[in-house]
């Protein structure tokens, strides 16, 4: 009897395939996309704290202001065709999209093969962080800008309230920015100013730098800033647990802070709070705020220069204070096919197109400390900028 030959077939598991069919790397791209979006969403806090709109088929988006009107008595026999003073007055605000913002990396296929960790996931998170950092920085600068502006409604007898600058402390030293009692007093002053200007209490928030936030956390035992049920990691996370005067507080390294971002090291002065560097902080901690006027390539609005924030030390605002317009939300692109063969690797790209500006100045408060520039604090935007970028 002849012996029958048999063939053993082994089922190969391809974890990158969708339903075990098609492209063996199909799911890897989705993993990368998810990591990028996660990195962006976990680090971009300003996106949900201001007015966000999506723009299609255009380069700018119009926001309309409607001012107050008055009540008047009716004269018997007269037709009612609107107030005699033509109120309410109306003005507009246009937010223009800046050029495409990108962050990318080239992944060499051999490096990916030899790496003992998931290389693309790590790179994707860093791309998400970079986009989120820029996104927040631009929005926060526009809120500071709004705090220095008069209202766009300028009709005689119907002028609407503008922005507010509040000094933290009473000395000409930037170190006042870290004094809890001075910060708390500034918060109550800001809340009163917002009330007086008719700004809604819904959606009022503040953004401080981490050291300011932790100074407040250390004082919660005596100043009653939080609900006693909020303790531990929830308290220290900086995700809107602490409230002062109904203002929810967040922490971020992306606010303009004495001409830098988030923190500033060095000897105490009128423009430096005097924090000793912890050492080995690298190139990205305490960066000087970059110039971002309309003359800078890629910028179509006016986000100011580092010198414009020489005494800034925190922001308090309501949701209507600023707006962001997106024509391209956070997206991921990756090369494939012949391009990947030629270069033996892939370019991974994260991109977005957005623009931001203040909307209602009355809803913007800038905290300042140290020596005053002019009579009120940081100088108002507009004097040395293009007329269409105020």
Image (cartoon, helix red, strand yellow):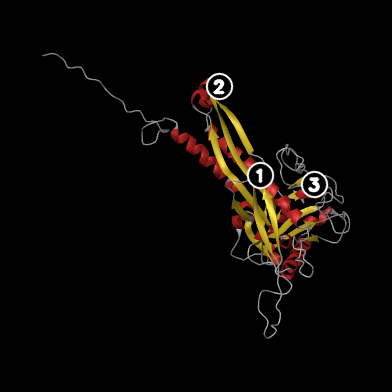
Compared across the picture, whether 102 is left or right of 4 comes to right
Instruction: Place residue 19 in its image quadrant.
Output: top left
Q: Is residue 209 above or below residue 72?
A: above
Determine the image quadrant of residue 73. Answer: bottom right
Question: Residue 61 vs residue 158: left or right?
Answer: left
SS at mark 1? helix
| Among the two numbered marks 1 and 2 on one chain, the one whose residue lies closer to the N terminus | 1
Residue lying furthest left: 1
Front residue (pair 347, 266): 347
State the residue position of label 1: 133
Q: Which residue is mark 2?
A: 343
Indicate whether 383 appears above or below 319: above
Question: Secondary structure beneath disc 3?
Answer: loop
Which residue corresponds to the image point at 61% horizontal and 33% vertical from the top-left? Answer: 104
> Could you tell me residue 206's position as x and y percent?
69, 58
Does the CB distance between marks 1 and 2 fall below 8 Å? no
Residue that badge 3 annotates: 386
In the image, residue 217 lies at what x, y percent?
A: 69, 58
Q: Name the residue at 76% across, 53% down.
A: 145
Residue 42 appears in view: yes
Crowd band around label 3 with a 10 angstrom C-alpha radius: few (<14), some (14–19), many (20+):
few
Residue 359 in view (yes/no): no
Percent x, y of residue 210: 70, 51
Residue 334 position in % (x across, y down): 53, 32
- The residues bearing labels 3 and 2 have C-alpha atoms spaced at a distance of 44 Å
Q: In the figure, is residue 22 to the left or right of 165?
A: left
Q: Mark 2: which secondary structure?
A: helix
Give how far apart the Cα atoms at labels 1 and 2 are. Answer: 30 Å
Closer to viewer: mark 3 or mark 2: 3
Label 1 or label 2, whichever lies nearer to me, is 2
**In front here: 260 or 139?**
139
């Amino acid at each position: 009897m002849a012996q029958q030959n048999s063939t053993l077939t082994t089922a190969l598991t391809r974890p990158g395939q969708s339903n075990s069919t098609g492209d063996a790397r199909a799911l890897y791209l989705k993993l990368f996309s998810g990591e990028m979006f996660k990195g962006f969403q976990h680090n971009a806090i300003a996106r949900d704290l201001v007015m966000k709109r999506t723009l299609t088929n255009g380069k700018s988006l119009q926001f309309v202001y409607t001012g107050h009107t008055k009540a008047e008595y009716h004269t018997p026999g007269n037709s009612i065709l609107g107030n005699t003073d033509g109120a309410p007055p109306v003005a507009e605000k246009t937010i223009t999209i800046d050029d495409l913002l990108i962050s990318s990396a080239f992944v060499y296929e051999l490096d990916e093969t030899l790496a003992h960790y998931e290389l693309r996931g790590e790179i994707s998170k860093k791309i998400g962080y970079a986009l989120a950092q820029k996104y927040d920085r631009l929005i926060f600068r526009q809120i500071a800008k709004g705090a220095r502006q008069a209202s766009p409604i300028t009709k005689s007898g119907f002028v609407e309230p503008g922005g507010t600058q509040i000094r933290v402390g009473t000395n000409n030293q930037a170190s006042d920015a870290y004094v809890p009692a001075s910060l708390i007093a500034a918060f109550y002053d800001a809340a009163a100013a917002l009330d007086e200007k008719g700004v809604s209490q819904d959606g009022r928030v503040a953004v401080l730098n981490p050291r300011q936030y932790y100074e407040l956390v250390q004082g919660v035992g005596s100043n009653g800033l939080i609900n006693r049920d909020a303790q531990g990691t929830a308290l220290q996370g900086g995700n809107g647990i602490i409230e002062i005067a109904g203002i929810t507080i967040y922490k971020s390294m992306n606010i303009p802070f004495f001409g830098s971002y988030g923190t500033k090291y060095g000897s105490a002065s009128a423009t430096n709070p005097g924090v000793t560097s912890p050492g080995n902080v690298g190139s990205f901690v305490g960066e000087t705020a970059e110039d971002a006027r309309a003359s800078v390539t890629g910028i179509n609005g006016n986000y100011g220069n580092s010198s414009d924030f020489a005494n800034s030390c925190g922001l308090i605002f309501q949701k209507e204070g600023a707006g962001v317009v997106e024509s391209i939300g956070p997206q991921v692109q990756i090369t494939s096919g012949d391009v990947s063969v030629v270069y033996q690797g892939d370019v991974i790209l994260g991109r977005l197109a957005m623009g931001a500006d203040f909307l209602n100045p009355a809803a913007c408060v800038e905290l300042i400390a140290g020596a005053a520039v002019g009579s009120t604090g940081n100088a108002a935007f507009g004097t040395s900028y293009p007329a269409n970028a105020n």
